[in-house]
């Protein structure tokens, strides 16, 4: 393994820590006017002009940028077509994460006339579970049962948390209530999968110290 590939692997670990760390810290330090679990979305902490916007948006952007070299590492470590398709979906979700930070709520007050925040958010939450499912199916084909279970399982967390949220509403008119909860659950599931994948790739590299440079 080259130093570049080793560094790219650790970018996956670092990116997860930065992204989830920034989100978590922002929820702690945000004022009730900026964010509450009951009445706000996570993105409200990144809204233009809020005190937490540099932390929240910056964490998503930096974490996402760290995730891109990790996606490259996973691509060259891919063992079959499905794993590599899963990596492409992973990279797409990461780009969406960066987009959430770049196109924060009310970014039109600073640049662009059309808000792209919703598209970026849908890219993350919509594609992330498919990345896990497709990659996990590839891991099954490669005979890697533990990684397959982790990938498919964490990918399945996404629809489960959203379904649980919808059921919890019980037909209430305020469909935005507790919206941050499934968002956070999905973010943890995605970050958890990236972390598992990074650790797996790292351990695989360590078990083959004399393997070919990639």
Image (cartoon, grey):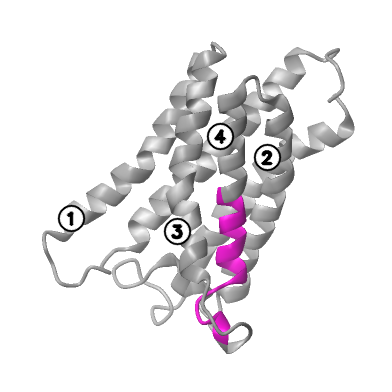
The image shows residue 112, relative to residue 143, as above or below, that is below
Q: Nearer the viewer, mark 4 or mark 2?
A: 4
Horizontal and vertical percent for residue 116? 53, 71
What's the CA distance linking mark 3 and mark 1?
A: 21 Å
Which residue ends up furthest to the bottom in the rendered image?
A: 109
What's the CA distance linking mark 4 and mark 1?
A: 31 Å
Residue 201 appears anywhere in the view:
yes
Q: Residues within 10 Å of mark 4 (few under 14, many from 20)?
A: many
Do labels 4 and 1 touch, CB within 8 Å?
no
Q: Disc 1 designates what residue?
A: 168
Horizontal and vertical percent for residue 189? 45, 42
Q: Nearer the viewer, residue 115 or 165?
A: 115
Q: Residues within 10 Å of mark 2 (few under 14, many from 20)?
A: many
**Number of marks drawn:** 4
What's the CA distance linking mark 2 and mark 3?
A: 20 Å
Magenta span main SS: helix
Q: Disc 2 designates what residue?
A: 71
What's the CA distance linking mark 1 and mark 2?
A: 35 Å
**Is residue 177 part of the magenta span, yes or no?**
no
Q: Earlier in the sequence, mark 2 or mark 3?
A: 2
Q: Disc 4 designates what residue?
A: 86
Quadrant for residue 177, please give it: bottom left
Q: Residues within 10 Å of mark 1 (few under 14, many from 20)?
A: few
Horizontal and vertical percent for residue 75? 69, 32
Q: Earlier in the sequence, mark 4 or mark 2?
A: 2
Q: Disc 3 designates what residue?
A: 122
Residue name at image x 36 percent, y 40 percent: 157
Q: Which residues are magenta?
A: 93-108
């Amino acid at each position: 393994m080259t130093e570049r590939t080793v560094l790219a692997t650790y970018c996956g670990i670092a990116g997860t820590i930065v992204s989830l760390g920034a989100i978590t810290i922002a929820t702690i330090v945000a004022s009730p006017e900026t964010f509450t679990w009951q009445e706000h979305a996570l993105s409200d902490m990144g809204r233009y002009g809020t005190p937490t916007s540099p932390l929240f948006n910056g964490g998503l952007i930096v974490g996402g940028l760290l995730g891109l070299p990790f996606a490259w590492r996973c691509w060259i470590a891919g063992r079959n077509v499905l794993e590599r398709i899963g990596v492409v979906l992973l990279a797409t979700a990461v780009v969406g994460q960066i987009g959430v930070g770049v196109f924060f709520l009310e970014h039109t007050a600073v640049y662009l006339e059309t808000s792209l925040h919703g598209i970026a958010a849908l890219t993350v939450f919509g594609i992330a579970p498919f990345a896990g499912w497709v990659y996990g199916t590839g891991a099954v084909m490669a005979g890697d049962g533990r990684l397959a279970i982790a990938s498919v399982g964490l990918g399945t967390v996404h629809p489960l948390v959203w379904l649980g949220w919808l059921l919890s509403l019980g037909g209430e008119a305020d469909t935005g209530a507790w919206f941050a909860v499934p968002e956070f659950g999905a973010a943890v599931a995605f970050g958890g999968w990236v972390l598992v994948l990074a650790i797996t790739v790292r351990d695989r590299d360590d078990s083959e110290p004399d393997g070919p440079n990639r």
